[in-house]
Each structure stands twice: as C-alpha cells, then as structure tokens.
Amino acid sequence: MIRTMSNSEINVKILRFSREIGKEPYYQTYRVPLNERMSVSNILQFINERYDGGLAFYQSCRCGLCKGCVVMVNGKSVLSCTKIVTGDIVVEPRDRKKVIKDLVGY
Ligand code: FES
C-alpha cells in the first residue's frame, strides 16, 4: 500500500479502453494525493488500489530494467516506474493501435 503524507493533489487523466468491451477510448480523471518521489507507477497503483481495480497497466521489475512499463505521459514516452510525478499528468498507452486494455498493449 502506498502512503501519502502531502496535502497536495493532482489530476491524473488516463486514456481508458477495453478491447473486450469495444467502446471508443475515453479519458477518465482521478484526483490523487501527491507524495514526494511518487512515480507514475506508484500513482497507477494507488488508483488501482483505491479507486478502480479494473485499471490495467504493466509492472514488472519496477526499477527501470525490463523496459516493459513504457507509457506516454503528457505526450512523452517514459518508463512509468522511474518517471517521478510533480504535477497534473495525462497518461496514455505507448501505441494506441496495439492496446489490449487501458495502458497494456502487445
Ligand atoms: S517495470 Fe521494468 S522498467 Fe518499469
């Protein structure tokens, strides 16, 4: 479980999509308390644990080695496990054409 100690909150806007459901992709925004040194992965984990257990995203090594957690954050390709968040973010999958669900692709 991720603990937060700060009073600041950020907006995290995530592009959602499920190939199974087949609806058009849509953005969903969450308000998330921001702690120092929170990575994008930490924030996605927080949302998954607190708000939406159906949010799909990739995690493996969590230390920048496997390169499997690439997502687009504010339009730039980043490793979600090492990218530290300092303000509002928009999180999208690496390749929208290859999305299986939310931020997970093939
Ligand atoms: S989870 Fe392995 S590089 Fe991010």
Image (tube, rainbow, N blue to C red):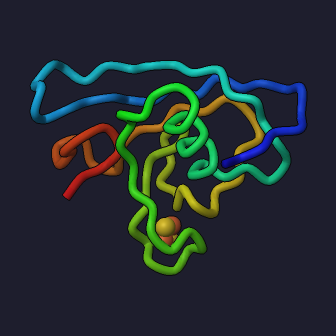
Q: Position of residue 89 (x, y in %)?
A: 60, 33
Q: Is residue 27 above or below residue 15?
A: above
Q: Residue at x 12, y 25 (%)?
A: 21
Percent across and percent down for residue 79 are: 52, 61
Q: Nearer the viewer, residue 50 or 11?
A: 50
Total numbered labels = 0
In this rendering, position of residue 39 left or right of residue 27? right
Measured as percent of width and height from the top left, residue 91 is found at 48, 37
| Location of the C terminus (image quadrant) | bottom left
Which residue is the extreme one toward the front? 1
* Closest to the observer, 12 or 77: 12
Quadrant hosting residue 10:
top right
Position of 17 compared to 9: left or right?
left
Of all residues, the one furthest to the bottom in this rendering is 65
3 and 98: which is toward the camera: 3
**Left or right, 65 with reference to 54:** right
Tell me if residue 62 comes above or below residue 47 in the rendering.
Answer: below
Q: Splitting the image into 4 quarters, where does residue 102 fall?
A: top left
What residue do we see at 43% from left, 51% from top?
71
